[in-house]
Image: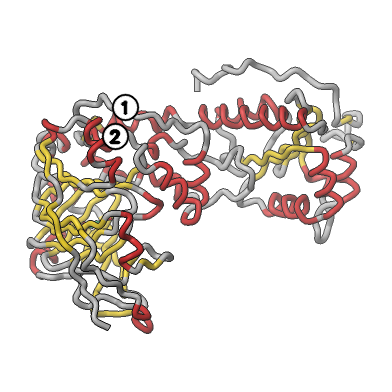
Amino acid sequence: REVSREPRLVPIPRVSAAQLPVRDFYQRFANTSTPVVITGLARQLVGGHDWGLEFLRTHCGGVTFPVTVTSSLTKGWAGWSRKTFHLTRNLSSHIDRIAATPAAPDVIFDGSIPQRCPTLLANFSVPQYFANDFLQRLPIDAPSAAVPDLDGGSAMRYRQADHWPSLFVSAAGSRTFMHTDSFGSNFWSLQVQGRKRWTIFHPRDTRQLGPSRLYGTFTADPHDPNGIDVMGRLKDLSSLTAWDGIVEAGDVLYVPAGSAHAVDNLDPVQIAVSANYVDVSNYAQAVRVSRLQDPYLHRLLASPHLDVSTNYDLSAPVPWGVYKKHRRRYDETLLAAQVRDRLRDAARRAAERGQRGVLVTIGHNVCAWCHRLEHFLQHDETTYSEVAAHYQRVLIQKPHPTAMTEGFQRLFADFAPALGHQIPYLVVLNVMGRVAAEQTAMQLQAERAPWYDREAVLRFLRGELILEGENSHEPPRRMWREAEVLRGTEDDGRDEL
Ligand SMILES: O=C(O)CCC(=O)C(=O)O
């Protein structure tokens, strides 16, 4: 089958930052999925320093970075994938090795600067065009509070926002094969040293390139003479147009979300500083793609509390400290507000449906009894029907299985005042959102599967359960009690957190 791997090439537009207000960047490039090289910005980003080889050696030479080795010639089993190896190496040794080894396939690829060498960022600024990053507004260390399942997701994921910017250090002749970036993210890259040739397709052409849905990689790659053509899916590319251009030291490149792109490294040592991000231009896409690729990130992004506003008035790169300040603002305070809102909404829904109230379960992903309780509530038919008929449900993951942060202590004080360290913990709120009953689920447990005592759970759900006090000297405590007005006002404590 004869196919042409050559798309029509047009140059990547180049615009000087002085001629490109942020609003124009959105109109001309971000909102039309058009890549652009922005010039005249680099020195402001690196605080006037020259981030060349010597600067990097001095500041991070001894720091270990992960190194990826990929070869187009080494195919994985049955040619379905390229083989990739991983090793670690300190930055100075890596620079020495690639400078001495043309076409070395060893690359520091997306090595986190904040995590590996944060001192580099002291004088760094983020280009104004990419500073409306919604990832920076996600809560730090977010527990999956107020989301309707107990899955805490990958604990690593919400740290994504703190992964970037990242370092790329590669040899002449090495290349990055055609791919799209993960979770529907946009991408920017400051070329610090050397030149790279970029080929970038419009997102609408993705299907033509023979995408592997699983990996975000492609069978067609106009730069790759050894391109993998899995099951003859390679499409004719002659009807496509791709942007193509050489990005030089001092250039800042924008690659739109969903665009397939491939990169060839042209000079002995290429250094780039890059980041993936989400803003108004790719928000819908990031929400959609992350739903499959990263459900936890998806839930955080899809939260109605996420600030999705855009500041079009930024006129200069945003200093690192200012860029990062949101990371604190959107911490527990936001989550506490989110949990409160969610409980209030659930109580309102229960009232509308004539139900008893809200059943809140507080747990943690590492707590086996929490998973057992959830399984029991979902799979024991009688219990499930009782809950479904009479309650709205809210599941809350504690920030930590045993420890409590101060902010969350205050949050829980409002609606689970007796919550100690024992989870899972159950709370029933009445339709006014006030605590009607609460207790650890321990007294409801059974010795063997399904691990919970149906009668005891049902009695709790029906408000009949009378329990011994925690301390045997105390008289039996009736867990269902008269509604107690929620302590505090809506704004309680938020500003102080
Ligand atoms: O600079 C490179 O080699 C490729 C970077 C890239 O395509 C990415 O991180 O998505």
Asked if ligand 1 lies within 8 A of label 2, the reply is no
Hey, what amino acid is under mark 2?
A: Ala
Q: Is residue 113 visible?
A: no
Residue plotted at (76% across, 29% down): 352
- As drawn, the label of residue 86 is none
Residue 110 picture location, percent across and down: 28, 54
225 or 437: which is nearer to us? 225
Residue plotted at (61% across, 31% down): 339
- Single out the mark in the foreground, 1 or 2: 1
Q: Is residue 155 left or right of residue 259?
A: right
Report which quarter residue 468 is drawn in.
top right
Of marks 1 and 2, which one's residue comes earlier in the chain?
Answer: 2
Please identify the quadrant where the N terminus is shown: bottom left
Report which quarter residue 446 is drawn in.
bottom right
Q: Is residue 154 left or right of residue 414?
A: left
Describe the element under mark 1 as helix, strand or loop: loop
Asked if ligand 1 lies within 8 A of label 1, the reply is no
Q: Is residue 152 left or right of residue 125?
A: right
Labels in figure, total: 2
Q: Residue tagged by mark 1?
A: 311
Q: Is residue 353 left or right of residue 278?
A: right
Q: Residue tagged by mark 2?
A: 131
Describe the element under mark 2 as helix, strand or loop: loop
Instruction: Classify 450 as above or below 278.
Output: below
Residue plotted at (56% across, 27% down): 337
Say if mark 1 contacts mark 2, CB within 8 Å: yes
Instruction: Classify 438 as above or below 103.
Output: above
Q: Is residue 107 visible?
A: yes
476 or 488: which is nearer to us? 488
